[in-house]
Amino acid sequence: MTLGKLILLGSALAVLLLPLAVDQARADDGVQVVSLRSEKVPLYDKPNGAKTGEVTKDTFKGPWRVLASSPEGFLQVEVEGKTYWVRPYAVETNKPIRAPADCGGVVALREPKSGATRGIGEECKK
């Protein structure tokens, strides 16, 4: 095989593999859950649905791909081939996401007392 044919073959191979590399780069550009913010994160079957399980920080095997977000403020994630819904404030993502106010949420953790936080609760109807 001559040098010219090798160069031509290499160029053709590079042209054929380029779209695969671009598709992989686009897949990596998506939003992903990279860690958990609390010790346990519940997994739901649908937004505001039944709790189907939970993941702890110790058992987290990420990143999880974020598939969608709901009007209720949940994120649909893919965990080991299955889809679940999680609350966005319970997870850390690789890109910033906006989480709407959770007006009916009950915090079970003991939070330190603070003065005030501007804007908290302004989206909730009284």
Image (cartoon, rainbow, N blue to C red):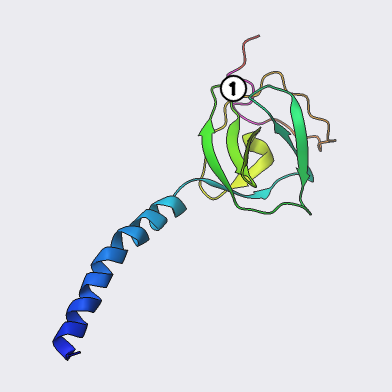
Residue 51 in the image, given as x and y percentages of width and height: 76, 28
- Amino acid type of disc 1? Glu
Residue 98 in the image, given as x and y percentages of width and height: 53, 34
Q: Is residue 11 left or right of residue 52?
A: left
- The residue at the point 69 percent across, 39 percent down is 90
Asked which secondary structure carries label 1, the reply is loop
Where does label 1 land, which residue?
72
Q: Is residue 59 left or right of residue 81?
A: right
The quarter of the picture where the C terminus appears is top right
Principal secondary structure, stretch drawn in magenta: loop
Q: Is residue 19 left or right of residue 1?
A: right
Q: Which of the 4 image quadrants contains residue 20?
A: bottom left
Q: Is residue 39 above or below residue 21?
A: above
Q: Residue furthest left?
A: 4
Q: Which of the 4 image quadrants contains residue 52?
A: top right
- The residue at the point 59 percent across, 22 percent down is 72
- The residue at the point 22 percent across, 71 percent down is 12
Magenta segment: 117-123
Q: Is residue 48 magenta?
A: no
Most foreground residue, 76 or 109: 76
Q: Is residue 49 above or below residue 60?
A: above
Q: Count the marks: how many?
A: 1
